[in-house]
Amino acid sequence: MTDDDTDDGAGVPDSDPRHLDPAGDLADLVESGEFDISLADDQDADDLRAFLDAVDAGEIDADPATEATVRIVRSLLDGPDDDS
């Protein structure tokens, strides 16, 4: 840390390390359609649904990265390429 670091107020969200959320930024891109992803041929959608069920049941701790992953998984499962 540098000498000019203070804790007297909130920083600017785009530059303050306390507000950086790269996983959330990626989830935003996936949800907006700017970053087009789809399930791999060998990926089982049921495994992803089981992950969502575990998060919803509280079996997996919800932190910002987990929340972003849930958003991405929901986008994958709800997307037009979902053929299951």
Image: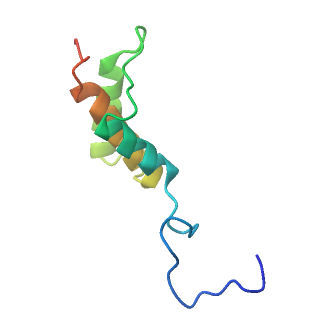
Quadrant in which the C terminus appears: top left
Judging depth in this view, the residue of 19 and 57 nearest the camera is 19
Is residue 4 positioned above or below 63 on the image?
below
Say left or right for 68 vs 4: left
Q: Which residue ends up furthest to the top in the rendered image?
A: 41
Determine the residue positioned at 36% across, 21% down: 38
Indicate the colouring scheme.
rainbow
Above or below 24: residue 6: below
Where residue 6 sits, quadrant-wise, is bottom right
Left-right relation of 62 to 46 = right
Is residue 6 visible in the rendered image? The answer is: yes
> Looking at the image, which is closer to me, 45 or 39?
39
Please name the residue shown 24% across and 25% down the image: 79
Outermost bottom residue: 8
Q: Quadrant of the N terminus?
A: bottom right
Residue 74 lies in quadrant: top left
- Residue 52's spot in the image, x, y percent? 30, 36
Q: Residue at x 73, y 86 (%)?
A: 4
User: Is residue 60 shown to the viewer in this render?
Assistant: no
* Along the viewing direction, whichever of 3 and 41 lies nearer the viewer: 3
Above-or-below relation of 11 to 76? below
